[in-house]
Image: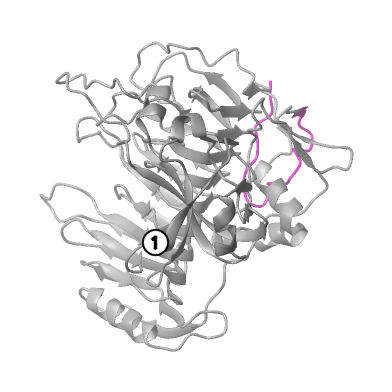
Amino acid sequence: MIPRLVISAAAFVISFSAIAQSTSRWVYFGPDHRLYYATDERGNRIMDFSHAGYKGGGVALPLVPAAKALSPETGDATARIQAAINEVSRLPLNAEGFRGAVLLAPGVFEVAGSLAISNSGVVLRGSGSGDGGTVIRMRGRPHRLLNIRGSGSWQTEGEPVPIVDAYIPSGATWFTVRATNASKFKPGDTVLVRRPVTEAWIRFMEMDKLIARNNGRTQTWIRAGTLIDTDRTVKAVAGYRITLDVPLTDSFDSKYLNPPGPVLVKYTFPGRISQVGFESVRIAAMPESGTNGEHSVLGMSAVSDAWVRDLAVEETRDAMSIGSTARRVTVERVRFRHRDHEPHMGGSSPADIAVSGTQVLVDRCSFIGKKFWPVVTQGEVTGPIVVLNLSADEAGFSPHQRWATGLLVDGGEFRNNWEWRPGVALANRENAGSGHGWSAGWSVVWNVKSDYLLIQQPPGGANWSIGATARYTSVLWDGRPLPVPCLPSDKIESIGMPVTPASLYLQQLRERLGDTALENIGYPVTNR
């Protein structure tokens, strides 16, 4: 019998002391005790996920001094809290990019409307999410408590420059641009790597014949002509070679992408805000009697270097949404609790955290309650997205739709799940919903514990499960028999036996930034 994995913040360490350990052939320690990575026949590998999180990973979440404090008063506090946020938003930025925090004193704040942070350097902080701390009691008709959002979107500069490599493997950090255009880029440029969705690629992915079961109509997976954007920064330019700060999460095969082919384009984002956070509050959602729906907590968009930490969230629906224009975000130690919930909206299950951005770390969060998905990704997401040491009553992580790449579920325990609702599902959802199709590729499940996992292999791609203590389901998301069994597969290793390193993300972070990076995010440094 495999001993139970301990994943609490205090007890988690980089090595599984006293637990038998195995080794992956895909990622393993070399003689120098650093990680080495195997590649497939085309050079694809498990990527470096360590750039996920605030400031690109390994940076401590700041404690911003309070610039305005509020005490509880009788009645709706929405306008009073918003006025305080607006007041702090008018203060000058300091050298670290902060204006100050709005501090809510211990006690209960009734909130019947939505709040917004729309300027850089502003934090909304309570006095703790536990007993004796701050409670925000959401009242009135269902609404979102807080929007953290800048304005606008990427503004491209100049003409897109063609990327000319015949094949770029997943996990690569560099590629080649057309010779006459390389001089347009320099280190520090913010860029979008644009991967086109073509009819040829849709056919290759076998997503061209989706038929809705309820009416027999043709469904569209991802529309041809769509551009899947990867938000990155240029690290180096050498001749015609462009090196990025963070690896690519998908492969680029010219056989299926040309024409028109992938391109690189510079961008600015003047409306994107940064250095913003929400922390240390208990949120109790109490919808108005007779209303249809439940409150949600947070939406993020047009934001970089943001965080959410130390929240206790009760009785919300679709609680957090991290939008496609968000990057370098940490969600840490957020605890969700639900009553028994009956799915509605055609039998769908809500998601507590829905991710569409990039470089997102969901760390040490917990979920109590049935028939919710704790964490999902949405369509056309390019990671790294890391779900680290998550615990959940039932299911844990399930990409929802339309091709998210570069996802890592690292550690964690998902209890009481079953074959058609596994703890982690990296799958082809076929004609679910409006034609969700292949939901994930080039993604990794590492040293998790779950009753069931669903791991499918997309055409031309891979999904790995390594060191999991779990059974592999024989059915699809809707209970039908799995057409191609998960096993045997060279992408599924060490069933029931954890592998080294105990945490892939933490070891990658340690090797890139040193021991201090682990201490910064609250993990002890021990012998490997």
The amino acid marked with disc number 1 is Arg
Q: Is residue 308 left or right of residue 28?
A: left
Residue numbers of the magenta segment: 1-22
Question: Does residue 8 show up magenta in the picture?
Answer: yes
In the rendered image, which quarter contains the C terminus? top right
Q: Camera-side residue: 498 or 366?
A: 498
Percent across and percent down for residue 509 are: 69, 52
Q: Camera-side residue: 311 or 231?
A: 231
Q: Is residue 279 left or right of residue 60?
A: left
Picture quadrant of residue 448: top right
Q: Camera-side residue: 171 or 456?
A: 171
Q: Report the number of discs.
A: 1
Q: Residue furthest front?
A: 180
Percent across and percent down for residue 8 are: 62, 47
Mark 1, secondary structure of its residue = strand
The answer, for residue 415, to whether it is visible in the render is no
Question: Does residue 178 show up magenta in the picture?
Answer: no
Q: Residue furthest right?
A: 31
Percent across and percent down for residue 393 are: 45, 36
Give the crowd class for mark 1: few <14, some 14-19, many >=20 residues within 10 Å.
Answer: many
Which residue was labeled with disc 1? 282
In the rendered image, which quarter contains the N terminus? top right
Q: Is residue 45 left or right of residue 297?
A: right
The answer, for residue 315, to whether it is visible in the render is yes
